[in-house]
């Protein structure tokens, strides 16, 4: 065996490439969610809408709880803004969160993860649910990058 060839070189490159793809997918997902938040919050006239949209996009890097943390700022800003329609606008902000969370969980995140990595749509959708059930709460957190790594190694084993 040639001593200049590192046996760990290829697996490390595979893991690094898979995690890089997952990071790109998460960044693109965050950008899409940021735009959705910005459009919705501007339509609802929420104070500091661009700030809350940016926070919503950045919270996508925290799987599972990021979306719930992202809605706190707009909800508080809306509640404190006053006016006679405050309760209605607050319920609309919470509804906007629900729409964005459903769109992101069922469509955007699985699609973007599939397009940037080798993870199939069904695995991107079911992986966090199954791992969240098996090892709560860590399963939800580690499922997307773990799936990217697993399917990167599976992609190497396919005949060429």
Image (tube, rainbow, N blue to C red):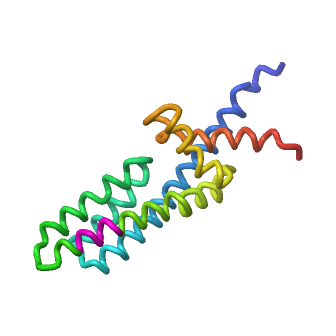
Task: Check residue 154 for magenta coloring.
Answer: no
Residue 121 appears at what percent x and percent y?
A: 65, 55
Residue 29 appears at what percent x and percent y?
A: 50, 60
In this view, 56 is above or below 13: below
Direction right: furthest residue: 160
Horizontally, residue 145 falls left or right of residue 86, namely: right
Horizontally, residue 123 falls left or right of residue 101, namely: right
- Magenta segment, which residues? 89-95
In this view, 112 is above or below 36: above
Residue 114 appears at what percent x and percent y?
A: 64, 56
Q: How many marks?
A: 0
Query: 83 or 21: which is nearer to us?
Result: 83
In this view, 110 is above or below 153: below
Query: 52 or 106: which is nearer to us?
Result: 106
Residue depicted at 66% across the width and 49% down the height: 119
Task: Check residue 90 for magenta coloring.
Answer: yes
Horizontally, residue 48 falls left or right of residue 100, namely: left
Majority secondary structure of the magenta segment? helix
Query: 65 or 13: which is nearer to us?
Result: 65
Horizontally, residue 103 falls left or right of residue 126, namely: left
Query: 1 or 104: which is nearer to us?
Result: 104
Residue 82 appears at what percent x and percent y?
A: 10, 73
Residue depicted at 36% across the width and 64% down the height: 97
Q: Quadrant of the N terminus?
A: top right
The quarter of the picture where residue 94 lies is: bottom left
Residue depicted at 16% across the width and 74% down the height: 86
């Amino acid at each position: 065996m040639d001593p200049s060839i590192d046996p760990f070189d290829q697996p490390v490159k595979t893991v690094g490439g898979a995690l890089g793809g997952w990071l790109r997918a998460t960044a693109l997902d965050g950008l899409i969610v940021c735009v959705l938040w910005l459009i919705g919050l501007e339509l609802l006239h929420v104070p500091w809408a661009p700030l809350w949209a940016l926070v919503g996009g950045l919270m996508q890097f925290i799987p599972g709880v990021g979306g719930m943390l992202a809605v706190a700022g707009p909800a508080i800003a809306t509640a404190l803004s006053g006016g006679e329609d405050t309760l209605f606008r607050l319920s609309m902000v919470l509804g906007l969160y629900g729409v964005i969370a459903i769109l992101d969980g069922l469509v955007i995140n699985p699609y973007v993860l599939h397009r940037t990595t080798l993870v199939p749509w069904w695995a991107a959708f079911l992986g966090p649910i199954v791992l969240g059930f098996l090892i709560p709460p860590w399963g939800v957190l580690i499922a997307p990058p773990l799936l990217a790594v697993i399917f990167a190694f599976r992609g190497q084993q396919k005949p060429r």
